Amino acid sequence: MARRISPPSGKKRPAHSATSGLIKPVREARMPSREEILQFIKENPDLAGKRDIAKAFNLKGDARIALKDILRDLAGDGLVEKRAKRLAVPGSLPSVAVLDITGREGDGGLIAKPTEWEATHADERPPVVFIRASRGHKGPAVGVGDRVLARIFQGADPSGPAYTGRVIKKIEHRKDAVLGVLRKLDNGEWRLEPVERRQAELAIDPAQLDNAKVNDLVEVEVSKISRYGLALGRITQIIGSVASEKALSMIAIHEHEIPHVFPDSVMAEAEKAKPATMAHREDWRKVPLVTIDPADAKDHDDAVYAEPDTDEKNIGGYIATVAIADVAAYVTPDSQLDREALKRGNSVYFPDRVVPMLPERISNDLCSLKELVDRPALAVRMIFDSEGRKISHTFHRIMMRSHARLSYPQAQAAIDGATDEKTAPILDTILKPLWAAYAALKRGRDAREPLELDLPEKKILLTPEGGVDKVIIPPRLDAHKLIEEFMIQANVAAAETLERKKQPLIFRIHDAPSLAKQEGLREFLRTLDISLARGADMRPSHFNNILKRVDGSEQQDMVNQVVLRSQSQAEYNPANIGHFGLNLMRYAHFTSPIRRYADLIVHRALISALGLGPDGITPKEEAALAEIAALISTSERRAMAAERATVDRLIAHHLADKIGASFEGRVQGVTKAGLFVSLATYGADGFIPISTLGDDYYHYDETNHALSGERSGKGFRLGDNVEVRLVEALPVAGALRFEMLTEPHPVPSGVRSHHKATRSARNGQKRFPGGSRGKPGGRRGRG
């Protein structure tokens, strides 16, 4: 179908012509103004690359150079930003997005807002999208409360809507369900206290308790709305007692609508699956591949092996092999398993449970690379020189047999001289060559200079009953780094092969920081007498140099946090722009098809592109890659939010009986409403309202990430080590409220302040984010 292109002049043209509706671009060669270029980018988001703009305005030769200068100036002024291979207006929506339909406009048309929205500044609200009717009344029937995948169009008429959308598909979405804790009042009436504190309390009919008890976590459907008093709710599901820590992850599962129960049809299909045969496979069962995973891993989807390259032309080089479970052999396009996997998008990991993308019959059995058991796999054999530069690679569909199942500490201990019964026989033949190959790959990684943020991850260890035992920072072993680098190189090889074969795929992309975020970081660093180079051609090495300057200083954690917040969010996209953080031009997820749908798509693409069997990617899937990428990007963010929320709730539950206790912490967030402090022992965040900081008027200094007193000039800054007292803990909400015990200190004067002075506790009018006066409104960042 011909694509309609808005005329660069911005003027309307007849909708029909002799060219079957195609509106021709302007043919006269002339240099467009900045306003005309911006208008073209707004009206043609899918055709806003530099070449597209030059073609639309019929620019050639020196005119294209002048256009490049104009686009650079527009980017420098923050009026456009690079998005994939196209230019876009900052804060604009992508061409495909997941939307929630929130209401109707005056003439009855539907209006929606993006499900996921990353604001460019704190006060920015998500844009409104007006839903177009499908052509010929085809497409899914949707209404208020539905969640949809939609194609987004920028409005061409300034007096009309900024965005319109056409529904591609309706996404399964729970509506009108309220999750909460069941309470019984002294007068005998029953109430539901919603987990989401912005939802109103509900009355529950005692005749419809359905065996639910006080303090049970239940799901309720609103059955009757009254003009006076509380709405009435009907219990639809009893999840269990909220007194149990194990119920806390279920709150996140329901709150974020994560599918966690496999339909019977999916389970039946998984049970019918038969072990893969040797058809279309090479026999690699004698290759001594080994798995190296966490000690408690239940599935094993990657195996590795390395050996010195004997080619005289590659002295000091290595051959590294990575084998990945062949999930595509069992989960075929448009099957019940496939549709459920796409709906889930990825596995979700909580401290007490895993919500898998695939049933255990597939993930933990048929696709798990078990020790000494034949398993199908897709393998890549990569040849590196002595400096870790990849010379070549080839992909193979194989049958393998893992020669050993090892844990990270076990493999590391063997290399460090403490072998056991399993590692001693393979130390010289398997483990030492792996580490020697990693040494070469590390030289290549160091030369590449990816972004090296120092942000250690905390892990919650649970008691047998499911409560918090302790929070630890697991050691970062060379065994971890080895597997990580082998997987990165395998992902690169997959992207390179598919791009060379001109096979459509889903890339893992990570854009450079926007110019606005760069400028914010630059102003912050200026307060530390650290400079950040200007220009759109930013490299990870620029950030690494900054991190090296503060390494070991008291500003180290603060600068790492601010640099992290300046980065763009990684996502899935069929259009490749490279991966900024890893400093790689081509990158696709290939190594975890058991737990990520993106990897399964890449496996299918490789099978088709290399002729490795009949179960590759289909034309239907290829045509829907943009939609699939939008869905799984949303699923990934949903999983991350649910995992963070569960950690917050577990820690709040653990600390609920420690009200009044003092803790060491660090300021991890500064907002105009107050401070977020992370506890050194537990890693959980709590909130300190600005109204409780002291007898002063506080300014929010966005540049310095600080709150500073108007009279004293003292306050608190991101990264400050502080002592706090726990005032309130709400396990269901995952909220902690602290009182500051550390005295304020002088903070730098900001370059600019976007918010007026905020009155302190004397005025008594401050509210916690998202909640009422005197109670925190929820978990980290809300408000």
Image: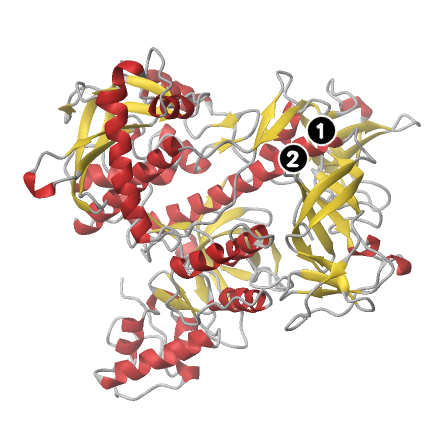
Q: Quadrant of the N terminus?
A: bottom left
User: Could you tell me residue 620's position as x and y percent?
Assistant: 28, 44
User: Could you tell me residue 419's position as x and y percent?
Assistant: 35, 17
Badge 2 element: loop
Q: Which residue is mark 2?
A: 682
Amino acid at the residue labelled 2: Tyr
Report the mark closest to the observer, 2 or 1. Answer: 2
Q: Is residue 307 left or right of residue 206?
A: left
Amino acid at the residue labelled 1: His
User: Could you tell me residue 255's position as x and y percent?
Assistant: 62, 37
Badge 1 element: helix
Of residues 436 and 536, the one nearer the viewer is 436
Of residues 557 and 508, the one nearer the viewer is 557
Q: Quadrant of residue 239?
A: top right
Q: Please name the residue shown 62% across and 34% down the image.
A: 646
Q: Is residue 1 left or right of residue 103?
A: left
Q: Which residue is mark 1?
A: 654
Of residues 212 and 398, the one nearer the viewer is 398
Tell me if mark 2 has few (under 14), some (14-19) or many (20+) residues whose alpha carbon lies within 10 angstroms of its own: many
User: Could you tell me residue 351's position as x and y percent?
Assistant: 56, 28
Q: Which mark is residue 105?
A: none
Of residues 451 and 22, the one nearer the viewer is 451
Q: Please name the residue shown 58% across and 60% down the image.
A: 126
Q: Please name the residue shown 75% across and 34% down the image.
A: 233
> Mark 1 and mark 2 in contact (Cβ < 8 Å)?
yes
**Disc 2 versus disc 1: distance between alpha carbons?**
10 Å
